[in-house]
Amino acid sequence: MERNVSSRIVLDITDPADLVFAIAVAEQHIPAVESLTVRLDGVPLEPREVSDAHGTRLHRVQAGTGRLVVEYSAAVAGQADADEPTEADLLAYSRPSRYAESDALLPTAAAEFRGIQTGADLLASVSSWVGTRLAYVSGSSLPTDGAVRTLLNRQGVCRDYSHLCVAFLRALGIPARLAAVYAPGLAPMDFHAVAEAWIDGRWCVVDATALAPRASLVRIATGRDAADTAFLNVMSGRADLVETTISAVVDSLPFDDVTELVSIA
């Protein structure tokens, strides 16, 4: 399977800014070809790459005022390396986090999923429950909304669906995390977010939106929730988002059997 991904981000910097981008494919993938350029008013800047413990490749940019254009592209062939979490990782992904308040949702999870015994059945049940109870509405949620707010509003976008899945799974005793991905087949095209659950010794994708085939996903970032996986963090200064353009295509779009356990490959 060959996948070609790209992103273009345009920012207006109105106060000198320290910016961190998460748009490059993760270390688990091996790009055959890759390019990253950063230009401020047409002048090239040199980003500094920083990798975290889970293979996320961050690019830090110090930018003065002006228009910043960041362009990334990669061709990804073959399978990604398997992700082997430590015991500490699994503990971290079992606890509540900022946007996945599993402690607050424990009574709801216990009531809605009582009697479901196996991990695979829980994954299917949680994905189906979230997918049928929420309405996918662009612009319906705030960047600060977490799983509890999503449950109350009964609507959201991919990050909201994923946060609710992650929170329910953790409340049910299953380690779960968020992955930011490029998603061939997604419409409308954008950065995408999915949940992952640790089942039978591997990370399995839970995408309650069902908007893209799970087998074609390309990992960008991995973390507890969106606080760890946002495509842009403004550490200081001010940067206003002007435009994002995302592309993700695959040589052959796979069929997604929702009854199967699938890992990001």
Image (spheres, rainbow, N blue to C red):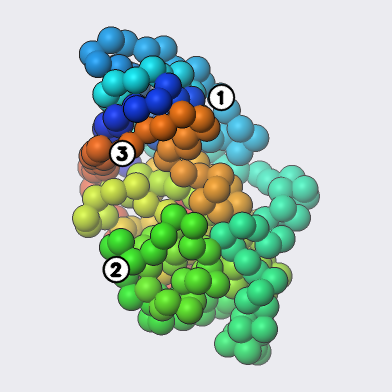
Residue sitting nearer the eye, 158 or 202: 158
Disc 2 marks a residue whose amino acid type is Val
Q: Residue at x 24, y 39 (%)?
A: 243
Q: Which residue is mark 3?
A: 241
Q: Badge 2, how many Cα within 10 Å: few under 14, some, many 20+?
A: few
Disc 3 marks a residue whose amino acid type is Leu
Relative to 37, say whether 211 is above or below.
below
Q: Is residue 234 left or right of residue 141?
A: right
Q: Residue at x 33, y 58 (%)?
A: 213
Quarter of the image where one finds residue 119: bottom right
CA separation, marks 2 and 1? 34 Å
Instruction: Choose mark 1 or mark 3, whichever is in front.
Output: 3
Instruction: Choose mark 2 or mark 1, whichever is in front.
Output: 2
Q: Position of residue 187 (x, y in %)?
A: 22, 57
Q: Of helix, strand and loop, which one carries label 1?
A: strand
Instruction: Choose mark 3 or mark 2, whichever is in front.
Output: 3
Q: Position of residue 234 (x, y in %)?
A: 47, 34
